[in-house]
Amino acid sequence: MKPAKDNASTLSAGEFAEREFPMTDADFEEIRKVAYKITGISLSDHKKNMVYGRLARRLRQLNIATFAGYCREISSKDSPELPNFVNAITTNLTSFFREFHHFQYLKSTIFPNLIKQNAASKRIRIWSAGCSTGEEAYSIAMVVKTFQQLNSWDLKILATDLDSNVVDTGRRAIYASDRGEKVPAEFSKYIVEDSRNNTVSIKPEVASLVTFKQLNLLHSWPMKGPFDVIFCRNVVIYFDAPTQTKLFDRYADILRPDGHLFIGHSENLHNISDRFQSQGRTIYQRAS
């Protein structure tokens, strides 16, 4: 979810110190260091207001009077507060069939090719990395269900995110009804509306294709691969260039030789990785 905007983004260090919880430049620098070390997220100066707003809730809940005190709380690698800290600073913005052309390409090109190429093994593996609340992974699963021949295949979609809260939301497969409005008519048969609770849920035959796991992309990956398709959209924009390069190298390593990578509309691999060939519109294929 995008943070709300207010005038605090232009506040000076002194004005930040006069707010509900004092936060000095040194406090913010320590928060940035911890965030980068744990998540790879690079918090720029203009994120200071966002950080203040999100972490102020944690200070209230923990009954901590200052950000200096909170920094001490997260200073230990074994601190029980670290998962809450990570959940607070991560941004989750997603919707069903966001950047619809990616799903059109899945349906028109990738799945027909995989059905031919993988006919012997009847195995397909897809990874939604940085899945947020799961709409992306379920959108992929809905496209899968349009190919009846895949019903008998060994096809699995892995959905991972750093934020344990959004992973839990995705696993529940229940969303506010207005989220369902993003589902195109041709795929609406895969969701169920509940007018009493003002929600929509993903049908079991679609939800069963997706497995949700909490995962830090910078840590070791328990899965072996190879993956046929990886979605990592609007994730690397929060990382610096060296971290992006390392991550895309790891994606290339775990993709099959002709596997595909989808990234976000504001992202590109120019001067970041030479291990992929552009297929246009932020769709890449691993270079052989």
Image (cartoon, rainbow, N blue to C red):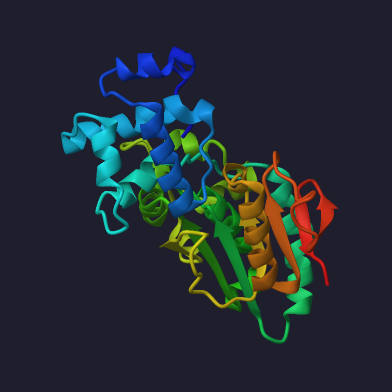
Q: Residue furthest bottom?
A: 120
In the rendering, at what x and y percent does residue 112 appear?
Answer: 77, 67
At 66% across and 81% down in the image, what residue appears?
A: 122
Q: Is residue 208 left or right of residue 233?
A: left
Name the residue rendered at 25%, 19% in the picture: 20
Quarter placement of the C terminus: bottom right
Depth check, front residue: 35 or 72? 72
Furthest toward the left, the residue is 63
- Residue ranking furthest to the front: 26
Q: Is residue 138 left or right of residue 168?
A: right
Residue 252 found in image quarter = bottom right
Q: Position of residue 55 (x, y in %)?
A: 33, 34
Of residues 23 and 117, the one nearer the viewer is: 23
Against 75, residue 6 (above or below) is above
From the viewer's side, name the closer residue of 35 and 266. 35
Rendered view: 1 above or below 136:
above
Residue drawn at (75%, 63%) of the image: 110
| Residue 59 location (% of width, % of height) | 24, 34
Q: How many marks?
A: 0
Q: Can residue 103 be seen from the camera position used here?
A: no
Q: Residue at x 54, y 50 (%)?
A: 189
Q: Position of residue 248 (x, y in %)?
A: 67, 60
Q: Is residue 156 visible?
A: yes
